[in-house]
Image (tube, rainbow, N blue to C red):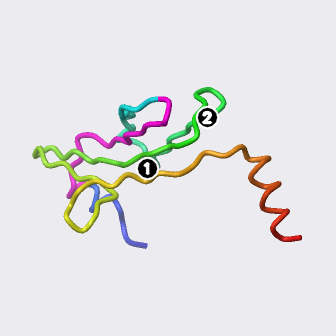
Amino acid sequence: KPSTHIFWFFLAPEKISIFYRTDAQPRYIEKTFDLASERHIFSFNPKDKPTKKFSYFFTIELKNGSVYATPIDNSGMVVPYTFKVEDPLEYYKKRSMKRD
Protein backbone atom coordinates (compact mmCIF):
# COMPACT_ATOMS: atom_id res chain seq x y z
CA LYS A 1 0.00 0.00 0.00
CA PRO A 2 1.58 3.33 -1.04
CA SER A 3 2.07 5.91 1.69
CA THR A 4 0.17 9.18 1.41
CA HIS A 5 2.45 10.69 4.06
CA ILE A 6 5.25 11.16 1.49
CA PHE A 7 2.89 13.09 -0.77
CA TRP A 8 1.63 15.11 2.21
CA PHE A 9 5.17 16.03 3.27
CA PHE A 10 5.99 17.08 -0.28
CA LEU A 11 3.00 19.43 -0.38
CA ALA A 12 3.79 20.97 3.03
CA PRO A 13 0.32 22.45 3.48
CA GLU A 14 -0.12 25.48 5.68
CA LYS A 15 -3.91 25.47 5.50
CA ILE A 16 -6.73 23.43 3.94
CA SER A 17 -10.12 25.09 3.62
CA ILE A 18 -13.57 24.76 2.18
CA PHE A 19 -15.33 27.92 1.05
CA TYR A 20 -19.11 27.66 0.93
CA ARG A 21 -22.15 29.84 0.41
CA THR A 22 -25.88 29.51 0.20
CA ASP A 23 -28.59 31.53 -1.49
CA ALA A 24 -29.30 33.05 1.95
CA GLN A 25 -25.58 33.92 2.45
CA PRO A 26 -24.17 35.41 -0.80
CA ARG A 27 -20.57 35.72 0.45
CA TYR A 28 -18.35 32.68 0.74
CA ILE A 29 -17.58 31.51 4.28
CA GLU A 30 -14.22 29.85 4.95
CA LYS A 31 -14.01 26.75 7.15
CA THR A 32 -10.44 25.62 7.89
CA PHE A 33 -9.70 21.94 8.40
CA ASP A 34 -7.40 20.40 11.00
CA LEU A 35 -4.09 19.56 9.27
CA ALA A 36 -3.45 16.68 11.69
CA SER A 37 -6.57 14.87 10.51
CA GLU A 38 -6.33 12.28 7.75
CA ARG A 39 -9.91 13.00 6.66
CA HIS A 40 -11.47 16.39 6.28
CA ILE A 41 -15.20 16.37 6.95
CA PHE A 42 -17.56 19.29 6.57
CA SER A 43 -21.16 19.06 7.76
CA PHE A 44 -23.94 21.43 6.80
CA ASN A 45 -27.44 21.15 8.21
CA PRO A 46 -30.04 22.97 6.09
CA LYS A 47 -32.45 22.88 9.05
CA ASP A 48 -30.08 25.19 10.95
CA LYS A 49 -29.53 27.46 7.95
CA PRO A 50 -32.39 26.99 5.47
CA THR A 51 -31.33 27.30 1.86
CA LYS A 52 -32.28 26.11 -1.60
CA LYS A 53 -28.82 26.23 -3.16
CA PHE A 54 -25.36 25.35 -1.83
CA SER A 55 -22.00 26.11 -3.53
CA TYR A 56 -18.48 25.18 -2.43
CA PHE A 57 -14.84 24.79 -3.43
CA PHE A 58 -11.62 23.71 -1.70
CA THR A 59 -8.24 25.42 -1.30
CA ILE A 60 -4.83 24.29 -0.11
CA GLU A 61 -2.28 26.90 0.91
CA LEU A 62 1.33 25.72 0.93
CA LYS A 63 4.08 26.95 3.22
CA ASN A 64 5.82 28.52 0.21
CA GLY A 65 2.78 30.79 -0.36
CA SER A 66 1.27 28.87 -3.28
CA VAL A 67 -2.49 28.35 -3.27
CA TYR A 68 -4.30 25.55 -5.11
CA ALA A 69 -8.05 25.27 -5.56
CA THR A 70 -10.52 22.75 -6.90
CA PRO A 71 -12.65 22.51 -8.98
CA ILE A 72 -11.20 24.65 -11.75
CA ASP A 73 -12.08 25.08 -15.41
CA ASN A 74 -9.78 24.83 -18.46
CA SER A 75 -8.50 28.37 -17.95
CA GLY A 76 -7.63 27.76 -14.28
CA MET A 77 -10.54 29.69 -12.79
CA VAL A 78 -12.38 28.30 -9.76
CA VAL A 79 -15.78 26.89 -10.70
CA PRO A 80 -17.56 25.97 -7.46
CA TYR A 81 -19.65 22.85 -7.13
CA THR A 82 -23.29 23.92 -6.83
CA PHE A 83 -26.30 21.80 -6.00
CA LYS A 84 -29.93 22.24 -5.09
CA VAL A 85 -30.78 21.41 -1.47
CA GLU A 86 -33.91 19.29 -1.21
CA ASP A 87 -35.87 17.89 1.67
CA PRO A 88 -34.86 14.19 1.79
CA LEU A 89 -38.45 13.03 2.25
CA GLU A 90 -39.63 15.00 -0.78
CA TYR A 91 -36.65 13.83 -2.84
CA TYR A 92 -37.33 10.15 -2.20
CA LYS A 93 -41.06 10.62 -2.65
CA LYS A 94 -40.47 12.12 -6.14
CA ARG A 95 -37.93 9.44 -6.94
CA SER A 96 -40.29 6.61 -5.99
CA MET A 97 -43.07 8.14 -8.10
CA LYS A 98 -40.81 8.04 -11.18
CA ARG A 99 -40.35 4.27 -10.77
CA ASP A 100 -44.08 3.55 -10.75
Residue annotated with mark 1 = 38
- Given residues 31 and 96, the one toward you in this image is 96
Callout in the foreground (1, 2): 2
Q: Which residues are magenta?
A: 9-24
Question: Would residue 46 be found to the left or right of residue 72 on screen?
Answer: right
Q: Main secondary structure of the magenta part?
A: strand
Amino acid at circle 1:
Glu
In the picture as drawn, the residue positioned furthest to the right comes out as: 100
In the picture as drawn, the residue positioned furthest to the top comes out as: 48
Q: Position of residue 60 (x, y in %)?
A: 27, 48
Question: Would residue 82 be found to the left or right of residue 45 on screen?
Answer: left
From this view, report whether residue 76 is shown above or below residue 31.
below
Split into 4 quadrants, where in the image is the N terminus?
bottom left
Residue annotated with mark 2 = 45
- Given residues 47 and 33, the one toward you in this image is 47
Q: Is residue 65 magenta?
A: no
Determine the image quadrant of residue 21: top left
Question: Would residue 8 be found to the left or right of residue 97 on screen?
Answer: left
Quote the CA–CA distance across marks 1 and 2: 23 Å
Name the residue at 66% across, 46% down.
Answer: 86
From this view, report whether residue 97 is shown above or below residue 15.
below
